[in-house]
Image: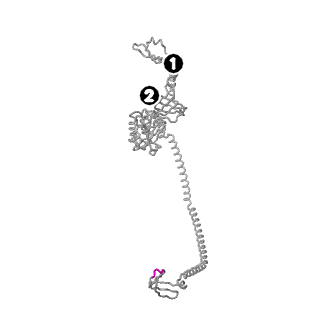
Amino acid sequence: MLLGRACADGSICGVVLLRTPRKAAFLLMSDSEFSVITPRIWQVGALCRAIADALESRFNPVAVRGEISGFSRASSGHCYFSLKDETGQLRCAMFRRAVGLLDFSPSDGELVEVRGRLGVYEPRGELQLIVESMARAGQGVLFEQFLKLKTRLEAEGLFDPARRRVLPAMPRGIGVVTSLDAAALHDVVTALQRRVPHVPVVVAPASVQGANAPVELIRALSNLYRLASGRQGLETGPLARPPIDVILLVRGGGSMEDLWAFNDERLARTLMQSPVPVISGVGHETDFTVADFVADLRAPTPTAAAELVAQPRSVSLALLDHLQVRLRDTLIRRLDGQSQRVDTLSGRLGRPSALAARRRLELASCAQHLRHAVVDAVRQHARDLQSVQSRLPQQVQRGLQGAHQRLDRAALRLGLLDPTLVLQRGYAWISDERGAAVTRARDLVTGQALHLHFAQGQADVKVTGVK
């Protein structure tokens, strides 16, 4: 390879790199010597292929250990990412065939070991590693910190779905937190201008990357919170600030290091204090941060975040047109119904004699029905009375006969209980001096006086002995 520069005496010198089988040598030559050795003029593509061949013969196959960064999956199924460590970074490509053999889903921050072949991507002249296999080798430091913080905040309830609020259908004002230099701001403003040009937007600028980014993001959110707390503008007049009904926290894609400000614990707790719903649109669809889990809703991109709160103006106009048609039809139907009712009432008021005649006919009909009903009722009561009168003697006679029969049966049962009938069969009833009946011999004592009651007459006796 030939490198040219100016020498101290004003002549043209060249630095030539000569590759020997063992090492490269640098020679400093004058312009006269330079004219002797003419370098080969390469076509760019040919030089890239030559470098690729040199890499192939020197390194491949190669195994590399590093942390995944900037992982993305194309619609073709191929995956692109970088492997990095503390001192370097290497672009990688993994084609769909190799991706289909994976037993896990790679993501940013994971520490992996890959095997593949080094080469040169000729369209851009970039060194890249074509990955043929990949295995987990543990998790990167940042990813481990992310998982620990996520687990702790989730245990505290910061990610509870029950605390997430519904987005306003038609916000009166939209707050945006992002960097003024970020492409995400342009995407959000463009989407909002296209969909809801009538809705005011308040931008609270903040750094979205770097050591100071968490503090600036928190300060920007706090400023919007003060504007949103009362749900009304802070000033009056033509420069009055609009009320904020929803806040967008947005940033474009990047590696885990680029998005690390959105994994800050202080920022997560500040998002919890928002008086209005917050949408997180940080990174791409495959990027996840702690802010995504704390926010009321996560959008895959900043543009998608804007679209979630910005119903297209055409939809609102179409809804207004539909409501206008419904209102007009309802009013027309109501007016038609009321007009018909007025016509009916006017007809009645115009001919009161006809109404009176109808009422007289109805009254006569009711009187006739009443007379027929009274006559029918009297006749029915007379028939019932005659039937009762004809049945009464028979019922009285049957009642008397039944009473006599019951009296005879009672007298018979009473006679059977007469104690004199028992005494007539030769039995006697014994009582002591008090007149109490004596039923057991052991209750007697010698010399005790007793009374014997016979069917005819009584006798007094004394006890001479008890057995």
Look at the image and say whether residue 312 sits in the magenta stretch. Answer: no
Is residue 189 at least partly visible in the picture?
Answer: no
Q: How many labels does the image show?
A: 2
Query: How far is mark 2 from mark 1, CA to CA?
Result: 29 Å
Q: Residues within 10 Å of mark 2 (few under 14, many from 20)?
A: few
Residue 165 lies, in percent from the top left, at 45, 44
x 46%, y 80%: residue: 442
Extent of the magenta region: 440-444
Residue 272 is situated, as x and y percent measured from the top left of the image, at 41, 42
Q: What is the quadrant of residue 234 in the picture?
A: top left
Q: Please, what is the dominant secondary structure of the magenta stretch? A: helix
Using the image, determine if residue 332 lies above or below residue 140.
below
* Type of amino acid at the residue the image marks with label 2: Gly
Q: Between residue 36 and residue 436, name the one nearer to us.
A: 436
Front: mark 2 or 1: 2
- Residue 94, horizontal then vertical, whole percent: 52, 30
Q: Which amino acid does label 1 sit on?
A: Trp
Residue 78: x %, y % from top left: 53, 32
Q: Residue, x 51% and y 33% (percent of image)?
A: 73
- Work out whether 176 lies above or below 391: above
Tag 2 residue: 88
Mark 2 or 1, nearer chain start: 1
Which residue is at the front of the view, 457 or 299? 457
**Which label sits on residue 147?**
none
Q: Do the residues labelled 2 and 1 touch (CB within 8 Å)?
A: no
Secondary element at tag 2: loop
**Residue 422 visible to the viewer:** yes
The local secondary structure at tag 1 comes to loop
Dot 1, crowdedness within 10 Å: few (<14), some or many (≥20)? Answer: few
Residue position for label 1: 42
Query: Which coloring applies here?
Result: one colour
